[in-house]
Amino acid sequence: MTRGQAALDTLDRCIVAALQIHGRASWQQIARAVGASDSTVARRVNRLFGEGLVRVAASIDPLACAQGYPVVVQISCEAGAATTVARRMAARPDVRFAALITGSFDVVIELIVRSQTELARVLFSEIDREPGIRSTTTESVLAHYKVARVWSYGTLPDEAAEALAAERGAVEPGEPRPLDEREQAIVDVLADDARAGYALIAQRVGSSESAVRRRLDGLIREGRVRFTTIVEPELLGYGVKAMCWLGVDLRNLEEAARALSARPEVRYVATTAGYSDITAEVVLRDQQDMHRFLTQVLGALPGLRRAEVGLELATLKRAFVIDESATAFFDAPSGTQPAPGPPHRATPQ
């Protein structure tokens, strides 16, 4: 049984689904969405955060902030070295995502680099020299079609989910531009506590609450700052995570990427240049659901020539946040469960 699996009841799962839609939603907004009182929601969220089962993380979008672009690296390891390699990769500050997978590769990571020169240095002077790595495959991310924070589809009623999305606001990307000094200070506070209230942020950065609200609302609206609710899918009844590498006829690439993006079980879609034409991440309920996805969703994509699927056995890092419980799992004696990760504060909203 997954850690904490028995601890989440129906209300907990609804609260987590609400946080996925709007990571900074107030107790009142979440309470309206799940049909509970403000105090009940506050108590439940504090427990989920305190036990390390759920975390809301704030991170910048490197592209929107002109800080680099993403590259996906698939790594094949020597026998017995995969977990050690995965942990070393996750510890790198330039890695946004790291996971252990099945299939042709053992580890997949997403790097953020500023230039091809930096990519060459990282690949050939650093990663390729890591002990335990047998080979690497690299592909550039050409365009993101979907980076979904919400994948617990069907947990909340459609009306409640739509109301939360409206309260969160739509992302309206502009021209990429770096964070200025005040924006960086706000981001630094959010890195420590993504749900910090405006008053607390203002106190920490030495500004007025209204100025902080205006700056942060702008960062969120422009997509330069994003909030991700990190939770093990098993806790919400989704037992299968998988990475998909697809070969697609180039004339059908746009149509296939958009078709995948429209699927609720797909939480990441990017067109890539290298090993595959499309890289996707999916969250499914069980093996039967996986069979349905392969035959009815992937099988129906226009121009599909090749599909490779690797089960995501453990996600060590997402949105630049290391999951200490996932990394500790490999050190735990057989038949035991590691202690939950460090608690995450739930700041009253």
Image (tube, rainbow, N blue to C red):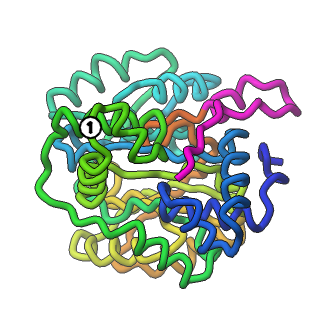
Image position of 31 with respect to 209: above or below: below
In the rendered structure, which segment of residues is drawn in magenta? 324-349
Residue 202's x, y, as percent? 34, 39
Q: Secondary structure at mark 1?
A: loop
Q: Residue at x 73, y 60 (%)?
A: 40
Residue 262 shows in this picture: yes
Across and down, in percent, residue 213 comes to: 30, 52
Is residue 327 one of those drawn in magenta? Answer: yes
Q: Is residue 148 left or right of residue 252?
A: right
- Residue at 33% in and 68% down: 248
Question: Where is residue 46 drawn, in percent x and y?
Answer: 68, 46
Graded by Cα atoms within 10 Å as few (under 14), some (14 to 19) or many (20 or more), the crowding at tag 1 reads some
The residue singled out by tag 1 in the image is 207
Is residue 144 found left or right of 189 in the rendered image?
Answer: left
Q: How many marks?
A: 1
Q: Decide which of 12, 215 is in the foreground and name it.
A: 215
Position of 326 relative to 140 (above/below): above
Residue located at (16% from left, 42% from top): 66
Instruction: Please name whichever residue, 54 or 234, is drawn nearer the observer in this view of the structure.
Output: 54
The secondary structure that dominates the magenta segment is: loop
Quadrant hosting residue 301 = bottom left
Q: Residue furthest right?
A: 335
Q: Residue furthest bottom?
A: 159
Counting from the top left corner in percent of width and height, residue 319 is at 44, 43
Q: Is residue 294 magenta?
A: no
Q: Amino acid at mark 1?
A: Ser
Q: Nearer the viewer, residue 8 or 307?
A: 8
